[in-house]
């Protein structure tokens, strides 16, 4: 692994923010985390054991859970990073990084990455993934909902589905913390399920794809934290952001096919994804096309993304 | 403001977005962060260069970032009309003919040569019409020296036939239209003899023999989805119609 020339500087910032490097190469709060998730221990442990020091982590995951392997190594997820225009050497925080899909995407775009999660299991996985994918300035950090990692002063913060399950008050307060820690010109990407998502009424089922990422770990009972476009905008505004872009996301934020601006974006809407396999998928496609193309009902899009610039 | 309009479709690894300037004018942006995708983006750039040097409508194509793990290419926005494959061949006869004609104009210098450049995904949906004039887009499979001349045009015709009836029904008028287009290409000397007889079998063989030209997407290409029986009947119909077999002998 080659060290970035400025890595010492970022390491200093991590230490100044109160984090120390543990034996597993993970930065942890010097005073210990107030909340550490170890719910994935057996799965991740099994995965790391299967991968071994030489074998591919990806192959091991494919053997254990092919569907999850698809999600974790999905290039589709990275599309949302295009909304952020990440420049070389910008400090990027993926808050609630889980398997590191977006964190690695930010690294590939030239960012100096801090991947944060409350789960040591995921961070152990990502530490190994980072080594196997030979990336340089990329730090794995254990942090909790206090968001103290943001004291390092990042340029970009990604909150992709991480706050699903949080109350509106908590979400607003965390967005406020992000705003306070960003420098002028700093950006945040915030993604949430849309509470008016049309597909829930058509297929009668919840899209649980957000469960694959997020500090809250998804909510198996549905998404009480789902928000509307106006709620997202209002939360971002009350956090302090004045330059806010809202986007409609199809079919979900984990593997999006289309990410279109809420204002005027539907002129670029088109049928998307691979061919529908089930009757319910076919119905969903037809309904979506009708709602978006004919009725221009973008507020019913399945998921929401917002980019705020300080 | 950006709009992500295509993201890793058909197993590919390129994400395409539109970027709007303050006046609302869009610009195309294609990016990739995988080795395979970056190779495809370089092909896209090469394809545009090759194409721009042969057409009246020039489309700007500029590499904005070229890092080891990430490449970003800006492509000029083409304001124009696109047609849907869902409308079938006969309803799209005019734009399909314009595509074949444009292909013949652009590729004509390769007449009589063993190989011609490959577009690799020529389709009605990969042509934007500025007035009657098509502009071919999506050059990610471009090769400067690929299959025999005529391949892309024949591929485009059979792809349209596939999407018209999903390989299950074939309209007589549509097959006749394909026959006429093949005859046009032949007259324009833009159809290699190896593709003129039993054309569907011939383009399938080229795809089978060169899967690396398309990567993981090769096995999903529509001409390969026709049943052997359909290939036999369609080719027989076309051969009878064009009579090119009498001129140049049976296809290989």
Image (cartoon, rainbow, N blue to C red):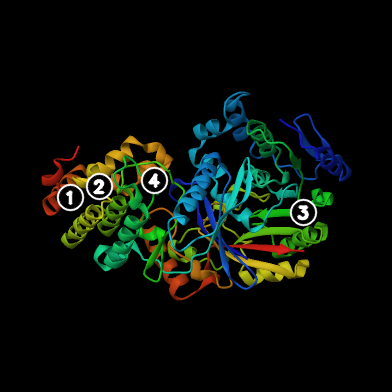
- Give the mark nearest the N terminus, 2 or 1: 2
In which quadrant is the N terminus of chain A drawn? Answer: top right
- How would you rate the neighbour count of disc 4 (Cα within 10 Å): few for under 14, some for 14-19, many for 20 or more? many
Q: Which residue is mark 1?
A: B234
Residue position marked by numbered label 3 in the rendering: A155
Q: Secondary structure at mark 4?
A: loop
User: What chain letter is assigned to the residue under label 3?
Assistant: A
| Residue A159 image point, x, y percent | 68, 55
Q: Chain of mark 4?
A: B
User: Residue at left 80%, top 37%?
Assistant: A5
Q: Which is more foreground, mark 1 or mark 3? A: 1
Both on one chain, marks 2 and 1?
A: yes
SS type, badge 3: loop
| Residue shown at the point (55%, 39%) measured from the top left | B35
Q: Residue at label 4?
A: B117
**Spatial separation of the CA atoms under disc 2 and disc 1:** 10 Å
Residue shown at 63% from the left, 40% from the top: B68
Residue at mark 1: chain: B
State yes or no: discs 2 and 1 in contact (Cβ < 8 Å). Answer: yes
Residue B142 relative to residue B189: left or right: right
């Amino acid at each position: 692994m080659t060290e970035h020339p400025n890595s010492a500087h970022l390491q200093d910032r991590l230490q100044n923010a109160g984090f120390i490097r543990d034996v597993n190469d993970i930065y942890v709060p010097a005073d210990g985390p107030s909340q550490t998730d170890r719910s994935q221990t057996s799965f991740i442990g099994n995965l790391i054991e299967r991968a071994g020091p030489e074998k591919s982590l990806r192959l091991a995951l494919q053997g254990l859970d092919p569907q999850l392997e698809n999600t974790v190594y999905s290039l589709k997820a990275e599309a949302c990073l295009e909304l952020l225009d990440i420049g070389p050497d910008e400090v990027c925080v993926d808050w609630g990084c889980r398997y590191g899909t977006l964190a690695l995407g930010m690294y590939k775009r030239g960012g100096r990455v801090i991947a944060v999660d409350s789960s040591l299991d995921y961070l152990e996985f990502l530490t190994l993934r980072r080594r196997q994918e030979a990336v340089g300035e990329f730090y794995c950090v254990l942090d909790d909902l206090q968001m103290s990692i943001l004291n390092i002063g990042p340029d970009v913060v990604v909150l992709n589905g991480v706050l699903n399950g949080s109350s509106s008050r908590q979400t607003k307060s965390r967005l406020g913390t992000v705003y306070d820690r960003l420098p002028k010109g700093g950006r945040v990407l915030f993604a949430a399920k849309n509470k008016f998502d049309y597909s829930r009424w058509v297929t009668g089922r919840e899209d649980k794809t957000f469960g694959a990422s997020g500090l809250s770990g998804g909510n198996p009972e549905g998404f009480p934290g789902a928000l509307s476009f106006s709620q997202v905008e209002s939360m971002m505004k009350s956090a302090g952001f004045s330059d806010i872009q809202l986007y409609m996301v199809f079919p979900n934020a984990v593997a999006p096919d289309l990410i279109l601006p809420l204002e005027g974006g539907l002129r670029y809407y088109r049928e998307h994804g691979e061919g529908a396999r089930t009757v319910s998928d076919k119905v969903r496609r037809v309904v979506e096309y009708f709602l978006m193309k004919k009725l221009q009902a973008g507020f019913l899009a399945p998921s929401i993304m917002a980019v705020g610039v300080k | 403001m950006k709009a992500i309009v295509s993201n890793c479709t058909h197993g590919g690894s390129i994400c395409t977005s539109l970027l709007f300037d303050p006046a609302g004018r869009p610009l195309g942006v294609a990016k990739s962060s995988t080795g395979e995708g970056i190779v495809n983006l370089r092909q896209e750039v090469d394809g545009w260069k090759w194409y721009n040097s042969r057409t009246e409508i020039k489309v700007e194509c500029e590499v904005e970032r070229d890092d080891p793990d990430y490449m970003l290419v800006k492509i000029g926005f083409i304001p124009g009309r696109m047609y849907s494959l869902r409308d079938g061949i006969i309803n799209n006869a005019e734009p399909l003919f314009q595509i074949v004609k444009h292909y013949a104009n652009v590729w004509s210098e390769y007449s009589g040569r063993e190989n011609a450049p490959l577009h690799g995904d020529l389709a009605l949906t990969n042509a934007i019409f500025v007035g009657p004039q098509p502009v071919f887009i999506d050059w990610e499979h471009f090769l400067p020296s690929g299959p025999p001349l005529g391949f892309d045009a024949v591929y485009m015709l059979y792809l349209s036939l596939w999407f018209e009836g999903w390989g299950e029904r074939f309209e007589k008028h549509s097959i006749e239209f394909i026959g006429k287009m093949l005859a046009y290409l032949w007259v324009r000397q833009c159809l290699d003899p190896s593709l003129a007889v039993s054309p569907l079998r011939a383009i399938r063989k080229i795809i089978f023999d060169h899967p690396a030209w398309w990567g993981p997407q090769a096995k999903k290409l529509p001409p390969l989805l026709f049943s052997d029986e359909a290939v036999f009947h369609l080719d027989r119909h076309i051969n009878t119609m064009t009579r090119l077999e009498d001129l140049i002998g049976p296809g290989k």
